[in-house]
Image (spheres, grey):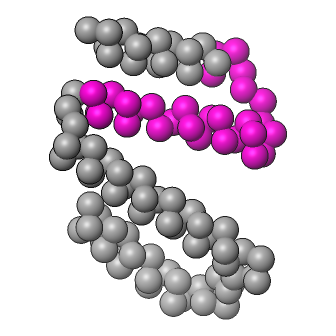
């Protein structure tokens, strides 16, 4: 994961230098970006810890549900509408995890 992050930073440095004037953050944008970065690091740390200490079969199934969080946050924060097929997808994914957990 460290190599992945280092590669990503390396790939973003060159465009950031080229587009320096257009990428200057406004004052109100800095803290949300810092919060997002901290949440990302915390999530990766918890995933690494869970895969080390827990059953990988359980951790991988639960970790695969991260797109549901994106859908829920888009609805709550951005006010996006969740369509019926999306609702069905969320419900079936949660049901699948429940069935896998039950054994």
Instruction: Name the quadrant containing residue 84.
Output: top right
In the image, 97 versus 71, the foreground residue is 97
In reply to whether residue 62 is colored magenta, the answer given is yes
Q: Is residue 7 above or below residue 92?
A: below
Q: Residue at x 57, y 63 (%)?
A: 36
Which quadrant is the C terminus positioned in?
Answer: top left
In the image, 101 versus 95, the foreground residue is 101
Instruction: Name the quadrant containing residue 61.
Output: top left
In reply to whether residue 99 is colored magenta, the answer given is no
State left or right for residue 38 relative to residue 86: left
State left or right for residue 84 relative to residue 14: right
Q: Position of residue 101 (x, y in %)?
A: 32, 16
Q: Is residue 78 above or below residue 91?
A: below
Q: Position of residue 54 (x, y in %)?
A: 22, 37
Q: Is residue 46 above or below residue 89?
A: below
Q: How many marks?
A: 0
Q: Residue at x 52, y 83 (%)?
A: 16
User: What secondary structure do most residues of the magenta stretch adopt?
Assistant: helix
Which quadrant is the N terminus positioned in?
Answer: bottom left
Q: Which residues are magenta?
A: 58-86
Q: Residue at x 35, y 51 (%)?
A: 46
Q: Position of residue 8 (x, y in %)?
A: 37, 69
Q: Position of residue 7 (x, y in %)?
A: 30, 71
Q: Residue furthest right?
A: 79
Q: Residue at x 32, y 9 (%)?
A: 102
């Amino acid at each position: 994961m460290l190599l992945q992050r280092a590669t990503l930073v390396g790939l973003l440095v060159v465009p950031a230098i080229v587009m320096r004037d257009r990428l200057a953050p406004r004052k109100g944008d800095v803290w949300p970006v810092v919060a997002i970065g901290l949440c990302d690091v915390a999530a990766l740390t918890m995933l690494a810890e869970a895969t080390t200490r827990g059953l990988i079969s359980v951790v991988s199934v639960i970790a695969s549900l991260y797109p549901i969080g994106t859908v829920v946050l888009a609805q709550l924060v951005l006010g996006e509408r969740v369509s019926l097929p999306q609702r069905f997808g969320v419900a079936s994914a949660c049901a699948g995890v429940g069935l896998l957990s039950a054994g």
